[in-house]
Image (cartoon, coloured by chain):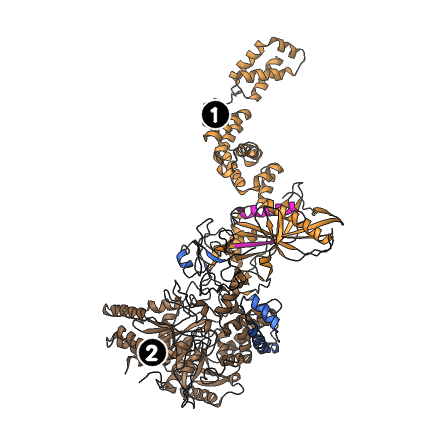
Chain colours: A blue, B brown, C orange
């Protein structure tokens, strides 16, 4: 499937990735090529085949309830670009 | 013999016999690293920590309390979070990130006494097959084509780890493999490397690329050294829900040199159109070596092989697009204000923080998961993935291991494929199927091409049967007797 | 419940073009009563310092991985069983992808296509006594997000991740409700069930229970309209107000020639209106896919059965038992089961009273219920206290009940004793002794008083003898007065009849 610049813009927005206008054009071409490549799968009849959820053949392991973590605000905030008063911050959001 | 030429097994013997100290090994490694800066192998050097850890090892040797890997320098791919040591994933978005935690795999190595020798370069977020997508610049392959001074790529994504071992700076390094990121660079750099079964090594603390495929593994010059490193790296981890709760076998003792009666399959579908004659030849030679060693070699069929790459290039970007959503400029990493509002900050941070290939894969992944396309792309790919895994299961009903080339070519020149994503992706054609099926695969150096560049052979085994993989790889290694070394062109006289 | 289920009588709204019907479905987010989070070991306690209950997993640091909390799985199953729902032995955790500052990973781990619990039901009772069945569509486990504080700084929104990763059960109803009253009754009943089960504390003030309300309108019996989702409504009252406001708004839009856009709206409790939430509207493409860091959750039937075996008696069943076995009136039974604490208190009361009197529950159910609901509740209400904060324990109240049932004190005296117990915390027997309220049933003593009353009032005696039977009441009153209310009225009556007749 060929995808156009508008589609690239839409998915770039969805992925929150800024893409320049010139790159948008080249990306449309590259992504179209990649999609054409992956569309080889159209040749495969996989009807009725269970989609793989994991290559690991075991059950989901569960941990017992109990407080074993947390209480490490300094560690949590250590790499934050702009932490204030014990909070992370982002540009003001209007809901 | 120089200290840097020693294998891990030889270092262990020498250290135990007190022929040299851990500090001497560390200094030799650091000196070699300093001489090789031009190859851009390291993103972060750790001289002080290296020497401090070596000194601790020496103290343990002095007290007679040495651990299995005490004093052995190991370079860490810069995808493993290391406490207090910058961890970047070769991305601008993480270029100042200092974890407050240690990945399980690296912690296991330190527990056993290994000495950290720097954080090695890689493709950004492990997305690439040539190490050209790193924010910190490409790594150079220590090997060069005969009579050609142009830079060759070391493969990727674990290119720095492959180069550090090939250049005799470290005897071993860690890698991660999502679609061939250990095996292909090992082949390109003339070393050994194994991607164990998915679940064998914990993923906790490894910067995620594609969670259902990512698996850590060792890279070293010999099969035995890989076994020694994997012994420490592997093991059940309650912090990783996909970690296998199974005992870790003694991998080194599996390398018996005896493969008599073993059945080895040659997947006919891997003989792809346009396979270079040299690749076909080294493959045939490998099959003959195994036959000569008493194995029964026979063709097997893996009919879904040609669909592995398209499947991979849906599943891996889809997972990546989600895994990389956390890099948003809020809690860690780069933050670019952009237009000033929240969305502007997100878009500027991620637009500037991620390189071109990463952006490309995020967009593809976002697209294949988006409303209206999920069933056609992602769900279909996961169905085909089941079929690919089934192919291997059937093959392993007939044979004990498979032999294939590791990569469809020798190391290519820098810039040769970076303009065309598809031709770059095709590099992983032989490594990706095993990643999709979660089974172990190992690359072993098998010889040199006519251009004087290394070529690798890949051994694939059943899930959790790394022992057979090591056994077969050991026989190939012995038969190939690969003794070539890259000319140390980087050392200025 | 004893009553038959009735068809809904829809709440009708008058519009310019005639009557409109409202259709309501609810998505309730109930916080699992676990100590630690769904996928990390950080604490869930309410009101901690910002970012102090955050693990590296909750902050979505690079390389961090989720490991599921076994207790949360059990509580989801338990709740499913309490809602008479089908438990799915295989369920899958998906990632719901969207960007928001309080969603650290850029995705929420939830269950989309294969939830842990499927269809179930809840019965609700309305003010007029009608009983309705509301279908449950599904229940799934998911992570809560953190908290964004928009009013702490002029230029920045602050983010606190303490709630990030807390386990929620999202309980989705079918669009079965037809009035704001039903919506309120549904949430109340659901809360009661969760609290009986112990799977959620139901504390709406602290956000342990929040509702997203889906509202649409249609002409009675017509096709379903487009629905709007009102997010995070956090009290019963607001739910009802939001429904009514939103229904009227939609009717106005449609009758004005407009169409309803499917959107997310926010209820503003200060103004009582709902408004469009632009921030959530922009990208509605969540790109769900199974979380590759987790495996499918597989339960065994034996595991589910074991949980089933530990289910407590739920409100509907308890109410039936109170009515049928304890012979309690429907009104009192309804009051007793509405709150778990009341029901628990009542069970102790009956058990303790049984120990003290040797009576069977059926012989004193109604008396116990009366004492609790008609008397103790009155005192509690006057004091603004809840049953948990009652100064009179269930055992102490049983002590009072026993004294009353065995005739030690009169009904009148009992009220005085309870008031004193309530004020001082003393037990019933001490109060009775201190105040000398022990009822006199000794016929000798009462006979003396009866004789005295007859002797003192010859005129009234003559009237009685002349056939004025009502004078009996006068004599009873005299005797009671002389005994300071302590004489057993039944004994007094008996003796008077005999003596006056003689």
* Residue C339 shows up from this direction: yes
Q: Classify residue B323 as left or right of residue B50.
A: right
Measuring from the top left, give residue C41's x and y in whole percent: 44, 56
As measured in the structure, the alpha-carbon distance from the residue carrying label 2 to the one carrying label 1 is: 94 Å
Q: Are marks 2 and 1 in contact (CB under 8 Å)?
A: no
Mark 1 highlights which residue? C432
How crowded pointer 1 is (Cα within 10 Å; few <14, some 14-19, many 20+) is rated as many
The image quadrant of residue B21 is bottom left
The verdict on a common chain for dots 2 and 1 is no
Q: Which mark is residue B319?
A: none
Mark 2 highlights which residue? B169
Q: Quadrant of the N terminus of chain B?
A: bottom left
The image quadrant of residue C322 is top right
Q: Classify residue B341 as left or right of residue B453.
A: right
Q: Chain of mark 2?
A: B
Query: Dot 2 lies on which element?
Result: loop
Q: Quadrant of the C terminus of chain B?
A: bottom left
Q: Which residues are magenta?
A: C168-196
Query: Dot 1 lies on which element?
Result: helix
Measuring from the top left, give residue C125's x and y in whole percent: 64, 44
Task: Tell me, yes or no, whether the highlighted magenta stretch contains residue C191.
Answer: yes
**C100 and C197: which is toward the camera:** C100
* Residue B211 shows up from this direction: no
Q: Nearer the viewer, mark 2 or mark 1?
A: 2
The image quadrant of residue A50 is bottom right
Measuring from the top left, give residue B67's x and y in whole percent: 30, 69
Task: Tell me, yes or no, whether the highlighted magenta stretch contains residue B478.
Answer: no
Task: Say above or below: B444 vs B109.
Answer: below
Task: Say above or below: C269 vs C431.
Answer: below
Q: Chain of mark 1?
A: C
Task: Say above or below: B464 vs C342.
Answer: below
């Amino acid at each position: 499937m060929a995808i156009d610049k508008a589609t690239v813009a839409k998915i770039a927005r969805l992925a929150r990735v800024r893409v320049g206008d010139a790159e948008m054009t080249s990306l449309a071409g590259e992504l179209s090529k990649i999609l054409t490549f992956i569309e080889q799968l159209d040749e495969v009849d996989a009807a009725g085949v269970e989609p793989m959820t994991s290559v690991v053949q075991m059950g989901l392991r569960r941990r017992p309830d109990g407080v074993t973590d947390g209480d490490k605000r300094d560690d949590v905030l250590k790499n934050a670009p702009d932490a204030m008063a014990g909070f992370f911050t982002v540009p003001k959001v209007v809901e | 013999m120089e200290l840097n030429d020693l294998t891990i097994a030889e270092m262990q013997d020498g250290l135990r016999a007190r022929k040299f100290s851990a500090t001497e090994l560390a200094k030799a490694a650091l000196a070699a690293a300093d001489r090789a800066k031009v190859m851009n192998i390291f993103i972060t050097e750790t001289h002080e920590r290296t020497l401090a850890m070596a000194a601790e090892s020496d103290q343990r040797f002095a007290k007679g309390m040495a651990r299995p890997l005490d004093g052995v320098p190991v370079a860490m791919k810069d995808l493993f979070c290391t406490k207090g040591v910058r961890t970047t994933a070769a991305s601008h978005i993480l270029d100042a990130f200092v974890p407050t935690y240690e990945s399980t795999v690296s912690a296991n190595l330190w527990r056993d006494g290994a000495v950290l020798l720097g954080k090695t370069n890689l493709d950004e977020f492990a997305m690439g097959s040539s190490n050209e997508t790193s924010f910190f610049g490409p790594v150079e392959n220590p090997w060069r084509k005969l009579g050609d001074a142009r830079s060759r790529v070391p493969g990727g994504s674990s290119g720095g780890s492959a180069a550090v071992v090939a250049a005799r700076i470290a005897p071993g390094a860690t890698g991660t493999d999502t679609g061939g990121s250990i095996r292909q660079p090992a082949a390109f750099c003339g070393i050994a490397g194994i991607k164990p079964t998915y679940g064998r090594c914990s993923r906790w603390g490894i910067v995620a690329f594609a969670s259902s495929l990512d698996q850590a593994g060792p890279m070293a010059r010999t099969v035995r050294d890989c076994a020694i490193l994997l012994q420490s790296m592997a093991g059940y981890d309650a912090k990783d829900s996909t970690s296998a709760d199974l005992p870790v076998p003694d991998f080194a003792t599996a390398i018996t040199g005896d493969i008599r009666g073993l059945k080895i399959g040659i997947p006919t579908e891997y003989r792809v159109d346009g396979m270079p004659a040299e690749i076909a030849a080294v493959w045939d030679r490998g099959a003959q070596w195994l036959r000569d060693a008493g194995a029964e070699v026979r063709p097997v069929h893996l009919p879904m092989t040609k669909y592995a790459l398209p499947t991979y290039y849906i599943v891996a970007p889809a997972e990546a697009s989600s895994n990389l959503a956390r890099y948003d400029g809020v809690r860690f990493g780069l933050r670019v204000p952009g237009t000033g509002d929240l969305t502007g900050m997100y878009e500027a941070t991620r637009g500037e923080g991620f390189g071109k290939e990463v952006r490309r894969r995020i967009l593809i992944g976002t697209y294949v998961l988006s409303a209206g396309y999920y069933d056609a792309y992602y769900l279909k790919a996961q169905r085909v993935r089941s079929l690919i895994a089934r192919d291997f299961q059937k093959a392993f009903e007939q044979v004990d291991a498979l032999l294939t080339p590791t990569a469809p070519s020798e190391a290519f020149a820098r810039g040769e494929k970076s303009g065309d994503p598809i031709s770059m992706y095709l590099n992983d054609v032989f490594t990706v199927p095993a990643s999709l099926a979660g089974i172990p695969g190992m690359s072993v150096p098998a010889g040199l091409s006519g251009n004087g560049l290394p070529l690798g052979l890949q051994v694939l085994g059943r899930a959790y049967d790394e022992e057979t993989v090591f056994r077969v790889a050991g026989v190939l290694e012995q038969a190939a007797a690969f003794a070539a070394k890259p000319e140390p062109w980087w050392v200025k006289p | 419940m004893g009553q038959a289920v009735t068809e809904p009588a829809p709440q009708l709204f008058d519009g310019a073009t005639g009557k409109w019907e409202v259709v309501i479905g609810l998505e309730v987010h109930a916080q699992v009563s676990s100590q630690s989070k769904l996928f990390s070991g950080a604490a869930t306690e309410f009101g901690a310092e910002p970012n102090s209950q955050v693990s590296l997993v909750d902050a979505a640091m690079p390389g961090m991985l989720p490991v599921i909390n076994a207790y949360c799985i059990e509580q989801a199953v338990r709740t499913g069983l309490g809602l008479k729902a089908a438990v799915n032995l295989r369920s899958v955790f998906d990632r719901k992808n969207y960007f928001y500052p309080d969603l650290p990973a850029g995705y929420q781990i939830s269950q989309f296509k294969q939830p842990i619990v499927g269809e179930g039901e809840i019965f609700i009772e309305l003010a007029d006594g009608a009983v309705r069945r509301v279908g449950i569509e599904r229940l799934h486990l998911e992570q809560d997000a953190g908290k964004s504080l928009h009013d702490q700084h002029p230029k920045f929104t602050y983010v606190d991740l303490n709630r990030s990763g807390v386990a929620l059960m999202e309980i989705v109803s079918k669009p079965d409700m037809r009035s704001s009253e039903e919506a309120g009754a549904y949430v109340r009943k659901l809360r009661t069930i969760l609290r009986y089960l112990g799977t959620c504390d139901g504390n709406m003030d602290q956000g342990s229970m929040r509702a997203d309300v889906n509202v649409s309108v249609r002409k009675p019996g017509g096709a379903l309209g487009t629905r709007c989702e009102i997010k995070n409504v956090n009290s019963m009252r607001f739910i009802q107000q939001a429904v009514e406001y939103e229904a009227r708004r939609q009717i106005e839009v449609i009758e004005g020639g407009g169409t309803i856009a499917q959107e997310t709206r926010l209820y503003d409790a200060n103004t009582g209106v709902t408004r469009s939430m632009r921030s959530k509207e922009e990208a509605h493409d969540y790109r769900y896919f199974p979380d590759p860091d987790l495996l499918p959750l597989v339960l065994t039937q034996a595991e589910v059965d074991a949980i089933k075996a530990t289910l407590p008696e739920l409100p509907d069943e308890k109410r039936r038992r109170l009515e049928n076995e304890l012979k309690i009136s429907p009104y009192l039974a309804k009051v007793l089961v509405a709150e778990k604490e009341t029901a628990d208190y009542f069970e102790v009361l009956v058990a303790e009273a049984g120990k003290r009197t040797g009576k069977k529950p059926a012989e004193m159910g109604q008396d116990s219920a009366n004492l609790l609901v008609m008397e103790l509740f009155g005192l509690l209400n006057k004091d603004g206290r809840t049953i948990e904060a009652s100064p009179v324990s269930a055992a102490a109240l049983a002590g009072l009940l026993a004294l009353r049932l065995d005739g030690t004190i009169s009904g009148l005296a009992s009220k005085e004793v309870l008031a004193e117990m309530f004020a001082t915390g003393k037990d019933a027997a001490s109060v009775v002794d201190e105040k000398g309220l022990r009822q006199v049933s000794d016929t000798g003593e009462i006979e003396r008083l009866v004789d005295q009353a007859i002797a003192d009032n010859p005129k009234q005696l003559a009237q009685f003898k002349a056939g004025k039977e009502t004078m009996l009441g006068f004599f009873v009153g005299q005797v009671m007065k002389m005994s300071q209310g302590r004489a057993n009225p039944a004994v007094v009556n008996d003796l008077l009849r005999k003596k006056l007749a003689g």
